[in-house]
Image: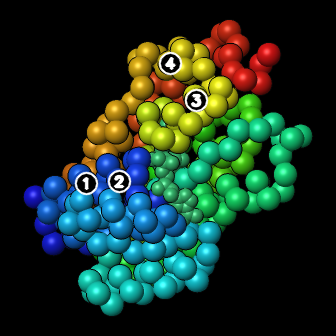
């Protein structure tokens, strides 16, 4: 029960990594608030955990403002905030419309800023708190057909470092986790649509397998735990089976290499 009495909020928590995080924090005694744009699934997921749901569309600054002030009014504080909401988009730049570009940047970069902009004053006033951004190896390494995703995640990693620099003096830590491939609906949709080939993907990972949800969760729990990571600030923790460490000598096959 390491997080007993702590208030933990997660964006995009209706399913996938966000839901796995919510479940883990609940099991560690935290008061967990699941937030998501998808109200129906979010309420269902929160109910199974006996946790709270708050609707939050991270693309809208006003939505972040509303949700965060409701959470603070109800729980009095926010100890851990996890920017996890994400979407996938697979198109070459020349085929990409401006709206598709904007959507990814809005969800995964501006959304993280909007939330940080609202929780910053809360955590600074508390003189404690921890913000964790869920990045990706795609924020570190380029991949064809993923310009908005890679750009948003690269921006998110830099936002992590800037926030860590701004808030460290107040005892507020900001870190990121950069997962490799984890078999959630987001990844399964990409495989089912033929955009990525599962065997090619696994061939790109030195450990030759998918990451487990629990492996991403454990890294987030570590970063959120004041006892274990009290001096870790501005870090980007890769949880990728060695993906970003490994430079392939032959071309990685994907839908855009035909
Ligand atoms: N699955 C992977 O292999 C993988 C790898 C690296 C990074 N990630 C990152 O992990 C995070 C979670 O991914 P996942 O695989 O669990 O995806 P997922 O699609 O299973 O879940 C994403 C959640 O975000 C929510 N969401 C989408 N738009 C939103 C918005 N505007 N406001 C609020 N919520 C919104 C969705 O409703 C959904 O519940 C994402 O940021 C993703 O980029 C995933």
Residue 234, percent from left and from top: 46, 55
Assign the C terminus to one quadrant of the image. top right
Labels 1 and 3: the sequence-earlier one: 1
| Residues under numbered marks 1 and 2 in contact, where contact means CB atoms less than 8 Å apart | yes
Q: Is residue 214 left or right of residue 207?
A: left
Which residue position is annotated with label 1? Answer: 23
Task: Identify the secondary structure beneath mark 4.
Answer: helix
Task: Identify the secondary structure beneath mark 1.
Answer: helix
CA distance separating discs 2 and 4: 24 Å
CA distance separating discs 2 and 3: 22 Å
Which residue position is annotated with label 2? Answer: 19
Q: Nearer the viewer, mark 2 or mark 4?
A: 2
Assign the N terminus to one quadrant of the image. bottom left
CA distance separating discs 1 and 3: 27 Å
Q: Is residue 50 left or right of residue 236?
A: left
Task: Identify the secondary structure beneath mark 3.
Answer: helix
Residue 118, percent from left and from top: 49, 80
Labels 3 and 4: the sequence-earlier one: 3
Q: Nearer the viewer, mark 3 or mark 4?
A: 3
Which residue position is annotated with label 4? Answer: 202
Crowding at label 1, few (<14), some or many (≥20) Cα neighbours within 10 Å?
A: many
Q: How many marks?
A: 4
Labels 1 and 4: the sequence-earlier one: 1
At horizontal 16% and vertical 55% (from top left) the residue drawn is: 27
Residue 202, percent from left and from top: 50, 18
């Amino acid at each position: 029960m390491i997080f007993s009495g702590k208030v933990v909020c997660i964006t995009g928590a209706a399913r996938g990594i966000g839901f796995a995080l919510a479940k883990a924090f609940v099991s560690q005694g935290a008061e967990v608030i699941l937030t998501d744009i998808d109200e129906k699934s979010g309420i269902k997921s929160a109910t199974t955990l006996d946790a709270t749901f708050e609707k939050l569309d991270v693309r809208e600054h006003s939505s972040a403002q509303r949700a965060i002030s409701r959470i603070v009014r109800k729980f009095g504080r926010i100890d851990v905030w996890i920017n996890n909401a994400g979407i996938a988009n697979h198109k070459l730049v020349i085929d990409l419309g401006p709206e598709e570009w904007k959507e990814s940047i809005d969800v995964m970069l501006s959304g993280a800023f909007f939330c940080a902009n609202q929780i910053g004053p809360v955590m600074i006033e508390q003189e404690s708190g921890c913000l964790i951004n869920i990045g990706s190896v795609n924020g570190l390494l380029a991949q064809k057909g993923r310009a908005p995703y890679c750009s948003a995640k690269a921006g998110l990693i830099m936002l992590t470092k800037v926030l860590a620099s701004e808030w460290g003096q107040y005892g507020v830590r900001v870190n990121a986790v950069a997962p490799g491939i984890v078999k959630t609906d987001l990844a399964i949709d990409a495989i089912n649509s033929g955009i990525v080939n599962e065997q090619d993907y696994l061939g790109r990972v030195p450990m030759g397998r998918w990451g487990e949800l629990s492996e991403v969760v454990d890294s987030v729990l570590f970063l959120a735990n004041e006892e274990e990571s009290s001096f870790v600030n501005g870090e980007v923790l890769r949880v990728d089976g060695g993906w970003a460490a490994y430079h392939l000598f032959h071309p990685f096959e994907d839908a855009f290499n035909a």
